[in-house]
Each structure stands twice: as C-alpha cells, then as structure tokens.
C-alpha cells in the first residue's frame, strides 16, 4: 500500500500514522502470536460478538492456545443488537481484566469502534483482527459513536497493528463486502469537497493524501463486479483501500479525506431511525446511496454558469433559521436539539460571514466547476456499481418518506462545521432549487 509518511512536499506538514504492522494476506491469522510478541503483549483482552467469533474468533483462540498465550474474552450475545453507545462500552469495560496488556478486536465496524475506545480509556494498545472489509474507520484514530441520538466522532486509540486474513474476508457476508465498496466510492465526494473547501475557506488540504484516496477509490470502482463473486484480488483492493482511508485521516488529523456530504446523509438516516426506534442498515451501504445522491446534486451544480452575489446575499438575509430548526425537529425528533445548539456556537448561517464567502465563491467559480469535473466520475458509473453491489439507489428504499427526503438532504449542512455541497448551495442561494430537482 502507498503511504505518505514523513514531511510532505505538497502541503509542508509532517504526516504520521503510528500503526506499526498491517497484514493483508491469506493465512494472516497464523502470524498473530508473532505480532503480539512484537507489540510486547503477553495477555490480550479479546472483544467479539457471536458472529465474529464464528468468523475468526474461534480460530484466533485456538491459535493463542497453541502458542500458550493466555487471554480474556468478552463476547456480545447473539440476541443483542450492538450499537456504539456508552452502554456497549460500559458492558465491555465491566468485563475488562486489568491484568491484560493489549486489547484485541475481532470484527469490524462497531466492534472495532468499541475496542479502540476501550484502548484509549485503558491506556493499553490494541490490535484489530478484521472479519469483513465493511467500513473505512479501520485504522482511524476516532470512534463513530451514538451520543444522545447523534452520530459523533470521538477521539480514540490508533491501532498498534491490524490483521486482515483474506481467507476470512472471502467468507464475509456479501452485504458487508458491498458496504466496504460503498464506503470507498464515497471518497470521490469527500476529496472533491475537501478541495472546494480549501479554495473557499482556506481549510488545510494535502494533494498527496487526496491523490492517494482518489487512486484507491478508482481501484475499488474498477473491481466491484469481481468483489461480489468473492474474488480475493478484489477483496484485497477494497480492504487496502479502507485501511488507507483510516491512515489518511490520521495523516491529515481530520476526517476530510474520507467523508463528506454522503456520510452525513448516512448519519442523518441513522439519527432518524434512532428517533423512531427502527434498525439502520450498514454504514457503507447507506454511504453508497448517499454518494449517488451527492453525485446527482453536483451534476446540478455543474449547470450553474455564474453566481448572483446580490441574490445569494438576499437569500441568506431572509433565511428563517427558526422555521428551519422546527423542520429539523420534525425530521429528527429530540436529536435535532444538539444540531440546533451546535449552530449557536458555529454560526454557519451568519449572513455577514456568508456575504464574505459568496464573494469568494463568485471569484473562483470556474475553478470550483473544474474541481467538480476533475474529481467526480460519471454518475452513471456509480449507478452501475451500486447495482452490481446490490446497494439501494434511492433514499426511499430505506423506508424514508418521499416528502422528508428534501429536508434530510438539506440537513447535511447541519451535522458538523464542515464545508460540504449543501453549504455551498446555501451560500449561493440555490439550495432549495437544486434539492427540489433531486
């Protein structure tokens, strides 16, 4: 895998990702005792659920027993729906044995998020044993957690190492393989928006990290059909791409290289389902659909020849945030209150600030259009890929009412203080018009 360690000639920053060892190969589980020894770990604490126990946990325990390595295990019961919450973290911590000197996550997604958080709290290193290439936070230094009905990224531990045994990954459920690919195609949008934000707001941007992620996204796009047939080369491409995404976030010190508007669509879907007490789909599946929605939004942005700065300023000055806050409450229930409270600190809707941004946007509009054209593939390519992966192509497929979809898309500008496509459209006074076309 291509890394960008050290001082970067493009952005001038020094990039570090302190992951010591990553194994992506067939039979990698057998190297786990040597990896633990290299990490100085004598007694790991294993975290898994019944599904990941079957996928790799039993084999890991057999390997550790054969190597005479003692361990302690916490396994979530089959009947539990595991969510990344304080309650789930608390259950694991209640079983945590302080004599253990390493946390060993056996799984991906939620299991990984919980374990890396346990690692941060305990101060002990952790190693990930991947059971499915289903999401991009594999090696990120944050955990995606549910807090009071809102998806938040909390600082957590960076893995000491990761083991991705292709023999295990090839047996992963097809839906999880599709989720990994869905999370990778999102990088087209995230990199595009990172470049646009750098141009408009001056946000830090690294061309080398961006190029690394774009290359990984293209590799996954080209092998999507082979992925669903269990092809090892395709599964390796997706796995390495997801690992690179986590590394890229560590290098950049933020989530910019890996997530943008498309991730916020998924987060809002989660928040809405949580408020209604309904189950959500896999993150990467939702992100795949969100990517297509974002692609269609940018197709409409391409059609805007120039910026009417006076009209845009009037749009911002006449914007009724109180009415919009009520629509957020209707869409998200009590979860909306955190977004509304956050806006008081961030001031994303401040008309004076918008006036400055829109002048800048008007001045660089041709460059913005060039970035969109350079960064994003043809929308039909993404539609074809989603079809091959079995990922839904509309938000209605997730049991979201048609009349709620416009507000859900618009609300992506409220999740974080991150400049994404819907914030650009709000700034230029075109948000309602463009989302209406979608």
Image (spheres, grey):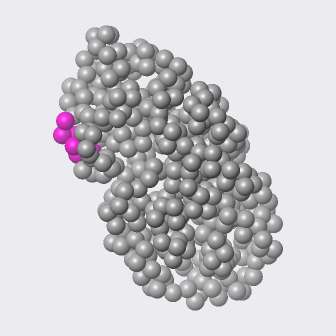
Q: Is residue 195 above or below residue 429?
A: above
Residue 406, percent from left and from top: 55, 74
**Left or right placement of residue 64 versus residue 184 in this view:** left
Highlighted magenta segment, given as a residue range:
89-95
Residue drawn at (72%, 69%), measured in percent from left and top? Answer: 300
Q: Main secondary structure of the magenta part?
A: helix
Residue 94 belongs to the span the image colors magenta: yes
Q: Is residue 124 above or below residue 269?
A: above
Residue drawn at (54%, 21%), measured in percent from left and top? Answer: 25
Residue 191 visible (yes or no): no
Q: Is residue 430 above or below residue 172?
A: below
Residue 233 visible (yes or no): yes
| Quarter containing the C terminus | bottom right
| Quarter containing the N terminus | top right
Q: Nearer the viewer, residue 354 or 318?
A: 318
Residue 212, percent from left and from top: 67, 40
Residue 376, percent from left and from top: 72, 54
Residue drawn at (70%, 86%), measured in percent from left and top? Answer: 311
Q: Nearer the viewer, residue 182 or 328?
A: 182
Residue 127, percent from left and from top: 40, 29
Q: Is residue 432 above or below residue 20?
A: below
Residue 126 belongs to the span the image colors magenta: no
The answer to which quarter of the image holds residue 421 is bottom right
């Amino acid at each position: 895998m291509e890394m960008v360690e050290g001082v970067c000639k493009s952005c001038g920053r020094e990039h570090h990702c302190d992951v010591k060892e990553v194994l992506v190969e067939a039979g990698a589980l057998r190297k786990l005792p040597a990896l633990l020894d290299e990490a100085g770990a004598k007694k790991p604490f294993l975290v898994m659920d019944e599904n990941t126990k079957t996928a790799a946990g039993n084999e890991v325990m057999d390997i550790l027993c054969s190597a005479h390595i003692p361990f302690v295990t916490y396994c979530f019961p089959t009947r539990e729906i595991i969510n990344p919450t304080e309650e789930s973290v608390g259950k694991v911590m209640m079983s945590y044995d302080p004599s253990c000197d390493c946390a060993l996550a056996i799984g991906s997604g939620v299991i990984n998020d919980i374990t890396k958080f346990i690692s941060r709290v305990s101060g002990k290193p952790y190693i990930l044993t991947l059971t499915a290439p289903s999401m991009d936070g594999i090696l990120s230094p944050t955990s995606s957690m549910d807090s009071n009905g809102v998806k938040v990224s909390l600082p957590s531990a960076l893995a000491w190492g990761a083991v991705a045994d292709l023999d295990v990954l090839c047996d992963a459920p097809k839906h999880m393989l599709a989720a990994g690919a869905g999370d990778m195609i999102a990088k087209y949008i995230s990199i595009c928006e990172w470049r646009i934000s750098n141009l408009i707001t001056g946000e830090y941007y690294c061309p080398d990290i961006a190029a690394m992620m774009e290359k990984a996204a293209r590799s996954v796009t080209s092998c999507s059909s082979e992925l669903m047939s269990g092809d090892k080369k395709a599964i390796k491409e997706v796995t390495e791409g997801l690992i690179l995404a986590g590394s890229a976030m560590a290098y950049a010190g933020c989530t910019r290289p890996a997530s943008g508007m498309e991730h916020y669509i998924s987060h809002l879907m989660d928040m809405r389902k949580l408020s209604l007490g309904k189950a959500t789909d896999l993150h990467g599946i939702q992100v795949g659909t969100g990517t297509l929605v974002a692609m269609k939004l940018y197709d409409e942005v391409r059609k805007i020849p120039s910026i009417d700065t006076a009209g845009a300023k009037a749009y911002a000055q006449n914007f009724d945030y109180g009415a919009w806050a009520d629509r957020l409450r209707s869409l998200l229930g009590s979860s909306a209150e955190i977004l509304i409270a956050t806006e008081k600190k961030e001031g994303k809707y401040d008309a004076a600030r918008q006036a400055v941004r829109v002048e800048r946007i008007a001045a660089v509009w041709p460059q913005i259009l060039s970035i969109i054209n350079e960064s994003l593939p043809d929308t039909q390519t993404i539609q074809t890929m989603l079809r091959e992966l079995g990922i839904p192509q509309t938000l209605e497929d997730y049991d979201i009412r048609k009349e709620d979809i416009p507000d859900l898309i618009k609300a992506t500008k409220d999740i974080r203080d991150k400049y994404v496509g819907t914030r650009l459209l709000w700034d230029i006074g075109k948000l309602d018009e463009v989302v209406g076309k979608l």
